[in-house]
Amino acid sequence: MKKFWQLWLSAILATFLLAACGTDDAKKDNTPVNGSSQTEDQASEEVAEFPLTLTDAVGNDITLEQAPETIVSMIPSNTEILFALGLNDEIVGVNDWDNYPEEALEKEKIGGMEFNVEKIVSMTPDVVFAHESMLGTGEEGLQQLRDAGINVFVVKNAADFEQTYETIKTIGKATGKTEEAATIIEDMKAKVEEVLAKTAKVENEKRVFIETSDVPEIYAPGKNTFMQQILDMIGAENVVTEEDWVMISPEEIVKQNPDVIIVMYSYVPDIVESVKKRDGFSDITAVKEERVVQVDENLTSRTGPRLALGLEEIAKAIYPEAFGE
């Protein structure tokens, strides 16, 4: 089940396409691809006034008569945003896989990819925050919630940092927490700028391989993925040159000989040592130089307040010297 969940997260990330501009020059001019500080300025100017009508990711207009007092979150990224906005008391239900912050573990569970419609209806939430990634398998259930008279707001898949900021801004507006959302965005942008300033000083670009599942089916992000954007931002080369997410053989990884291997899953015990012991991996530079690093996949797979920390952890794994490590 754990492996299935990791692959499902990979499938979500596979839908994250990069914005058309800014990624190629982000490293050269030390300008974040997320753009200027316009988002937090706008968020601070837009005070949510209720009744409030917002259009969600599928084009539905959702009207909220007042700031919601009971909220159900259907995916971990939404949950992390809601808690960061200070809505602990309002959250009454969360996804089975929600594990951050710790308070999320104490909330009533509503299911995972297959959620319990009847249970959600019984909670009588003022709003349910769903997610665009759920539409393939969960649309029927979401419609049942709508038919029961429940406000279902489908949050858009965030394809980059800028869209993540917009998501936080939108959820902040829907919950009457615009100032809190502006603060979160401002803090995230400050962290991004800090990371880019440090990695801009790196002279030797590293070749990196990132895997999100173990043998026999090793999956890795290629071009046009959120992870590719992160590598571009910090000036690292992705050894995977194919488009989107690909399954790659151990032999191909050996052939590519990456300087750094980043492991982004935790369902295999002692995975770093396991990777090092794969046939032929002893010849890889990353293994020879002890540069096989495990990074918490939730920091980058969940497009929420911790995404900037995910950028920092990836940067530290590749260029520890830039951070004094």
Image (cartoon, rainbow, N blue to C red):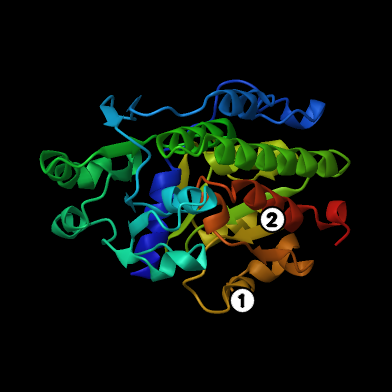
Q: Where is residue 179 in the image (x, y as percent from the top left)?
A: 58, 36
On the question of residue 252 being in view, the answer is: no
Q: Which of these two is toward me, 40 or 26? A: 40
Quadrant location of the C terminus? bottom right
Q: Name the residue rendered at 79%, 66% in the picture.
A: 289
Q: Which of these two is toward me, 227 or 80? A: 80
Q: How many marks?
A: 2
Q: Name the residue rendered at 84%, 54% in the picture.
A: 323
Q: How crowded is the residue under tag 1: few (<14 C-alpha within 10 Å), some, or many (20+)?
A: few
Name the kind of residue labelled 1 in the image: Lys
Left or right, 155 with reference to 251 = left
Residue at the top extreme, as displayed:
21
Left or right, 137 with reference to 301 = left
Q: Name the residue rendered at 70%, 37% in the picture.
A: 233
The circle on residue 313 is 2
Reply above or below: 103 against 163: below
Q: Position of residue 173 (x, y in %)?
A: 46, 33
Depth check, mark 2 against mark 1: the one in front is 2
Left or right, 173 with reference to 93 = right
SS type, badge 2: helix
The circle on residue 277 is 1
SS type, badge 1: loop
Q: How crowded is the residue under tag 2: few (<14 C-alpha within 10 Å), some, or many (20+)?
A: some
Q: Which of these two is toward me, 135 or 94? A: 94
Earlier residue among tags 2 and 1:
1
Name the kind of residue labelled 2 in the image: Glu
